Amino acid sequence: MLRSGPDGSSALGPNSSSALAQLRGRLSDVAPVGAGLGLLGISAYAFLGLAGHALAPREYAAVASLYLLTAVVGPGVFVAVEQETSREVSSRLSTDRPTLPVLRSATVISAVLAAAVLALLLALSPVLVHRVFGGAWSLLVAVVVAVAGSAAVHVIRGLFSGQQRYGWYGASLAAEGLARLIPSVVLVWVGIAGTGAGTAAFGFAFALGTVLAVAATVGGVRPGAPGPPLGLPRMARGVGFLAASSALTLLLANIAPVVLTSRLTDDPGTAASFVSLFVLARIPLFLFSPVQAFLLPSLTAAVERGQTARVRRQIRSVVGVTGAIGLCGVVGAAIAGPWAARVLFNAPFELPALVAALLGMSTVIMMIAQVLQPALVALGEHRMAMSAWIGGTVVFGALLFAPTDPLVAAVAAQLAGPAVVVVIMARTVRASLASKA
């Protein structure tokens, strides 16, 4: 609080000085991650935009399919390794235990997952190459490279997150973005994109992003001291639950426009307008994704020390801020969303403001789920995190395919499914904290 200084001027008291110091420290953590995430997001849109302008439609469709496939594999599988690595490292650091065993176990688990994913991709290779990649076997090789890079980079990011070394975490995101953005620009500039090698060149420009991110940040890895081996089955079980949760998160967050388009084959204008509005509504969710990298280490440390009151306060604070900011976004979506979809994405027409507002609300609910999930992971409730997403997916699917107006069904599903997830997660967090108090 403010107090009077020796010369009669106002000075900051000890509590205020401490609060300001904490705020500056938090901002110094957020800034590099936010910058890295922004660069990674820009690189994704730029990559697709440059490829779309440089390649023929058939080649672009193949490269875009590579982008979508690798994007699902990364967040859908290996982010689970990152989260569990972060939790284990945070837990050990808070109790002065060695962290090298965590890195070793995470590396083994990530390698096994990568081998499984690659085996599946190779088994499906005849279908993928001829039906998805337009006959370009080079894109299959690019996917293999991208999977190997994802397996490595998420282990490193989990270590950085658990150690709360957010400068290196942000550098990893930025390196991945730059490693995709710069080659894509160069390909267009030198004109190789218009040649027969354009498809393979763009494919590797994207696939090498994670590999180069590993090369750029591996020098910052601090493995920690050696110690007793960490049980692989226990860590693998946690990763499995989180991988299932991540896959269902992607499903709830992204599948509605696909289903709506398939149901509105006789009304492509409405489908295209919904897709454009949906993409705009989901932008805050993408920007909000690093919250787990910040929340998980601090919540895990508090749980390990038995500070349940601190955990409860932190969750309430972040949920409150998220809700307040999100409601402002809902109002903005209602006012400008349909117009922005038409201007920015050339939507055939403007959907009602109510649709935009409800899609914005569904995004806010998904953001709250991203706050509650790291709390469940910190509390060791991996199974219930997965159960929450299963419950939400069941409700989501039932409404999405309901025999009613497809647009109404899509919006209702997008609201109800995530809401069920949040309710189950909130009840589990409350019960778990009560049992530990």
Image: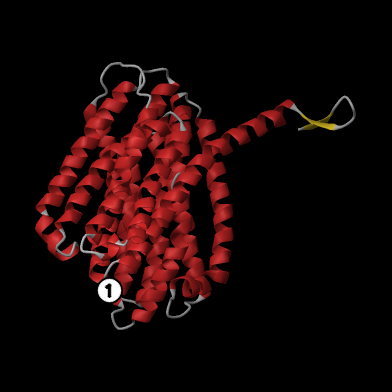
- 178 vs 433, nearest the viewer: 178
Give the residue type at disc 1. Answer: Ser
Q: Is residue 282 above or below residue 228?
A: below
Residue 412 x/y as whole percent:
40, 67
Q: Characterize the local packing of mark 1: few (<14), some (14-19) or many (20 or more) Cα atoms within 10 angstroms.
A: few
Residue named by callout 1: 262
State the quadrant of the N terminus: top right
Q: Secondary structure at mark 1?
A: helix
- 130 vs 268, nearest the viewer: 130
Q: Residue placed farthest to the front in the image? A: 190
- Asked whether the viewer can see residue 149, the reply is yes
- Count of residue discs: 1
Q: Residue placed farthest to the bottom in the image? A: 266
Q: Is residue 349 above or below residue 5?
A: below
- 133 vs 423, nearest the viewer: 133
Q: Quadrant location of residue 31? A: top right
Q: Residue at the spot x=32%, y=41% of the render?
A: 212
- Asked whether the viewer can see residue 354, the reply is no
Residue 405 x/y as whole percent:
36, 78
